Amino acid sequence: MTPNMNVQMVQKEQIKFLKFPKEDVLNKKKDQIDRFLELQRALSLGNLEHHKVRIVFVDDKGLKRVETTIWGITDKEVILKQSTIIPLERIISIS
């Protein structure tokens, strides 16, 4: 991701109103595996240290960013506070 891309900051409460296409934003299998490993690390940080992470994802309108704690991960979704869900395949990066 290049720094000049326009990423809109959203609150986690807004995520439930967004629409997510089904296709994965990452084409390479290695990138998808790295994304999952980063999510697992972020989950541990959230559970152990109550550490917030920055998630960059794509909805049907473009790039979005949220700063939040990850509460859970399934094979298809990332679960945030208040049962807010981001589809795993729509996440570009976690930091």
Image (cartoon, helix red, strand yellow):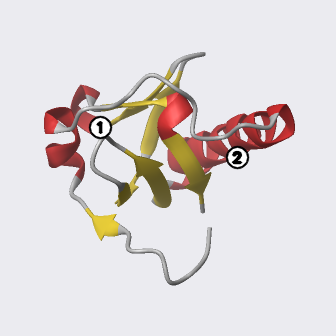
Horizontal and vertical percent for residue 3?
Answer: 55, 82
Q: Give whichever of 83, 3 is nearer the camera.
A: 3
Q: Amino acid at mark 2?
A: Glu
Residue lying furthest right: 30
Q: Is residue 6 above or below residue 4?
A: above
Horizontal and vertical percent for residue 93?
Answer: 60, 54
Select label 1 or label 2 by which is in front. Answer: 2
Q: Earlier in the sequence, mark 1 or mark 2?
A: 2
Q: Residues within 10 Å of mark 2 (few under 14, many from 20)?
A: some
Q: Amino acid at mark 1?
A: Lys
Q: Is residue 13 above or below residue 23?
A: below
Name the residue beneath numbered marker 1: 81
Q: Are marks 1 and 2 in contact (CB under 8 Å)?
A: no
Q: Quadrant of residue 87?
A: top left
Name the residue at 66% across, 40% down. 26
Horizontal and vertical percent for residue 14?
Answer: 15, 46
Name the residue at 52% across, 48% down. 46
Name the residue beneath numbered marker 2: 38
Residue lying furthest bottom: 4
Horizontal and vertical percent for residue 58?
Answer: 41, 47
Which disc number belongs to residue 7? none
Helix, strand or loop status at disc 1: helix
Q: Is residue 51 above or below residue 76?
A: below
Separation of residues labelled 1 and 2 (CA atoms): 18 Å
Residue lying furthest top: 75
Left or right of 81 in this view: 58: right
